[in-house]
Image: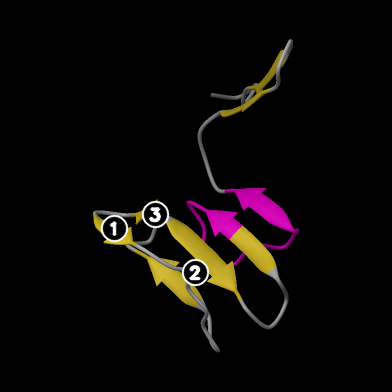
Amino acid sequence: MKWIGKHIVTSDVTTVDDVNLSDGLFVDDSTSRVGIGTSSPSEALELGSGNLRLNGDSTAISIYDADG
């Protein structure tokens, strides 16, 4: 079972087009790029604004906007 937005999905989701979830998460099917906070990602994963935190088993990496 997977949570997608406010809905519970009990199997994998497959699309044949772009996915745009409430202007928060965008998946560009033609370029295989994902945007969070942007609907035009120019990299494999692009964060439109805000901070990023990656957690691992023993370390965490935080990336902050220096201008923010």
Q: Is residue 6 left or right of residue 20?
A: left
Residue 56 appears in the picture as rendered: yes
Secondary structure type for disc 2 = loop
Residue 39 appears in the picture as rendered: no
Q: Which residue is mark 1?
A: 8
**Other-residue count near label 1 (Cα within 10 Å), few / some / many at <14 / 14–19 / ≥20:** few
Secondary structure type for disc 3 = loop
Q: Residue at point 51% right, 83% down?
A: 15
Say whether residue 42 is magenta. yes
Q: Main secondary structure of the magenta part?
A: loop
Residue 17 at x, y = what percent?
Answer: 53, 86
Q: Which residue is mark 2?
A: 12
Mark 3 or 1: the one toward you: 3
Q: Residue at point 51% right, 33% down?
A: 50
- Do callouts 2 and 1 mark residues in contact (Cβ within 8 Å)? no
**Circle number at residue 1:** 3
* Magenta segment: 35-47
Query: Looking at numbered disc 1 in the image, what kind of residue is underneath it?
Result: Ile
- Most foreground residue, 32 or 65: 32
- Most foreground residue, 66 or 58: 58
- Do callouts 3 and 1 mark residues in contact (Cβ within 8 Å)? yes
Query: Looking at numbered disc 3 in the image, what kind of residue is underneath it?
Result: Met
Residue lying farthest to the left in this orientation: 6
Q: Tag 3 or tag 2, which sits nearer the N-term?
A: 3
